[in-house]
Image (tube, coloured by chain):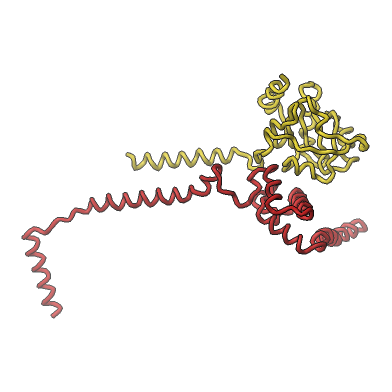
Amino acid sequence: MSRFVIPLILFLALVVFLAIGLGRDPHVVPSALINRPAPDFALSELRDPTKIVTPQQMRGKVWLLNVWGSWCPACREEHPYLLEIARSGAVPIYGLSWKDKREDALATLSELGDPYVLNVSDFDGRVAIDYGITGAPETYLIDKNGIIRYKEVGQLNPEIMEKKILPLVQELNR
Amino acid sequence: MRSCFLLLLMFAIFPLLASAREAQSSAADPVLEERVMNLSKELRCLVCQNETLADSRADLAEDLRGQIREQMKAGKSNKEIVDYLTARYGKFILYNPPVDPTTYFLWFGPFILLLAGLFLLFRYVKQRRKLIIEEPLSPDERLRAEGLLKAQGKETA
């Protein structure tokens, strides 16, 4: 009897491991920055490049930092949902325009609508590296003290928003 | 026809442009470039994860190499640069995983499996040995065997 049971158990264990492996997205690298201060930057604003924006200006606010580019199809797909979040007023979204041309980014915003409180331009992608970004879109949740509390690699959707981000926002706003 | 020619021309010129752009950064300082490439070989490209930063042609990899180059120019040591990158991208960026609690299974798992295999093999062989029962020949059998041996002896003689 045990001649069959042991290999069967081993086989089932293998199946479970493989199933877990299949369900995982290898591109989601766990962020090393969770519960660390959001890296500093001083970038020009997208609409008014003479204005310099730093994360210190968002102190006292719980906010999302959404990394996007007009060149990124997944960001276009995400865009309508960002507009929805902005309309709901649940949490302000700031944009990091990643390796984009200013006119392309502005054109995308006037075409699809603008969910952002404001955008900063990271033309050379240096700040993106500081934030450990591997692709767009990526979104950070940053608390009142400028600490990164959550990172979503890939598009935001209602499920992630309701299960992960909004409860955190409520908790952090308390 | 004309647009076709233009298209061909574009294809012909494009590789030249591409190589010109690449050559520029490496020609500037070959010693520095070698250092950049050597360090890049130890780091993982996060876009195509089975490639090193040195091998990857992904945009982000290029940016990361640029960042490494810049920090080297600023006089940072390899360790400082690696620390900078792991603080942002985690240990996953190290192509050669370090030995720490999260990677114990990766490093020692195969040896544990090897030991488990040796243990099972040893047990199996020991069990088998028990199954082999050495039974001495009965007097009858002994006589028969001797008879057979003698008969064979005569044949060969």
Relative horizontal placement of residue B131, taking residue B67 as reference (left or right): left
Q: Which residue appears at 70% of the width and 26% of the height?
A: A165
Q: Quadrant of the C terminus of chain B?
A: bottom left
Q: In the rendered image, which quarter is residue B6 located in? A: bottom right
Relative horizontal placement of residue B58, taking residue A16 as reference (left or right): right
Q: In the rendered image, which quarter is residue A140 located in? A: top right
| Chain coloured yellow here | A
Is B144 in front, or is A101? Answer: A101
Q: Colour of chain B?
A: red
B108 w.r.t. B8: above or below: above
Relative horizontal placement of residue A108, taking residue A38 as reference (left or right): right
Is B27 in front, or is A39? Answer: A39
Give the x, y percent position of residue A162. Answer: 69, 24
B33 w.r.t. A32: above or below: below
Give the x, y percent position of residue B60. Answer: 75, 48
Is A24 in front, or is A32? Answer: A32
Q: Which residue appears at 71% of the width and 46% of the height?
A: B84
Total labels drawn:
0
A171 w.r.t. A49: above or below: above
Q: Quadrant of the N terminus of chain B?
A: bottom right
Name the residue furthest bottom: B157
Q: Which residue appears at 79% of the width and 36% of the height?
A: A76
Give the x, y percent position of residue A43. Answer: 85, 39
A77 w.r.t. B157: above or below: above
Q: Which residue appears at 83% of the width and 46% of the height?
A: A124
